[in-house]
Amino acid sequence: MQDFTDLTRGVTRFRQDVFPARAELFSRLAGHHAPRTLFIGCSDARVVPELITGAEPGELFVIRTAGNLVPAHTPGADGVTASIEYAVAVLGVRDVVVCGHSACGAMTALADGHDLTGAPAVAAWLRHADASRARAGGGDVAGLVRHNVRAQLANLATHPPVARALARGEVALHGWVFDIATGAVEELTAAGPALAA
C-alpha cells in the first residue's frame, strides 16, 4: 500500500523523469486550457479517468463525486454545478461522460441498505440516487450502477448550460460503466448496453 512517503517520492520522480520528458507539453498547457471532454466519475481510487481513456494532461476536465452523482440543477452554487457550468459554458467541451463502475461503494451501500447513520453527509449525498434505487430495486448493485448512470445523465441535462448546449447540438452526453476486474468499458445507449469504443 502506498503511504505519504511514496507520494513524495512520486513527486520527485515526476520532477526528475516525467516532467523533463514532457516539458514542451506542460509549457503549452501553462497558457492553454481547452479540454474537449467533461468526465464525471466516481471518487473511487480505482477509477482513474486518464488511465482508462488514455488521455493526456489537458484533454479531460474531470469531476469526481461519490457514486458519480450529479444533483439536478437547483438555484445556488455548489462545486459540482460550478464545475459543470465552467466546462460547458466557458471551456466549451463537446462531450460529457458520466462513468459508473463495478463494485461501487456508494451503489453497494444503497443496494444493500447499509446503515449510514455514522456518515450523515454521505447519507444525504446518496439521496441524489433515490430515483435510481427505486428503479433498480434492492440488492442488484450492477443494475443500480447502470440505472444511476442514466439518472445522472438526466440530472445533468437539467443544468442550464448543458440544456442550452444540447438544444444547439453543441454537446453530446454519454453514459459508461467501467468494470474494474476486466478493464471493460460498457457504453449505455438509449436502446440498451453497447460496447464503448
Image (cartoon, helix red, strand yellow):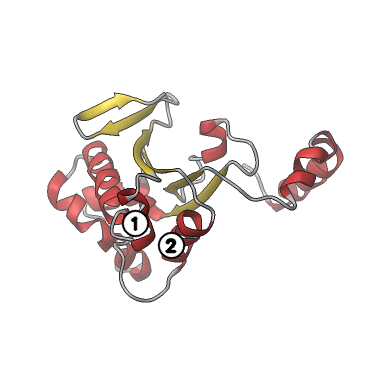
Q: Which residue is mark 2?
A: 80
Looking at the image, is mark 2 or mark 1 earlier in the sequence? 2
Write the residue at 76% across / 44% down. 28
Write the residue at 63% across / 44% down. 58
Percent from the top left, x then y, of residue 10?
Answer: 75, 43
Q: Is residue 180 visible?
A: yes
Closest to the camera, between mark 2 and mark 1, is: 1
Percent from the top left, x then y, of residue 133?
Answer: 18, 51
Q: Could you tell me which secondary element the residue under label 1 belongs to?
A: helix
Position above or below: 16 against 81: above
The one nearer the camera, 88 or 98, is 88
How busy is the neighbourhood of tag 1: few (under 14 within 10 Å), some, or many (20 plus)?
some
Q: Amino acid at mark 2?
A: Val
Position above or below: 5 against 46: below
The one nearer the camera, 116 or 73, is 73
Dividing the picture into quarters, in which one does residue 126 lie? Answer: bottom left
The one nearer the camera, 50 or 97, is 97
Dividing the picture into quarters, in which one does residue 2 lie? Answer: top right
Percent from the top left, x then y, of residue 23?
Answer: 82, 40
Q: Could you tell me which secondary element the residue under label 2 belongs to?
A: helix
Q: Which residue is mark 1?
A: 164
Position above or below: 180 against 43: above
Q: Amino acid at mark 1?
A: Arg
Q: Quadrant of the C terminus?
A: top left
Tell whether label 1 touches label 2 (CB within 8 Å).
no
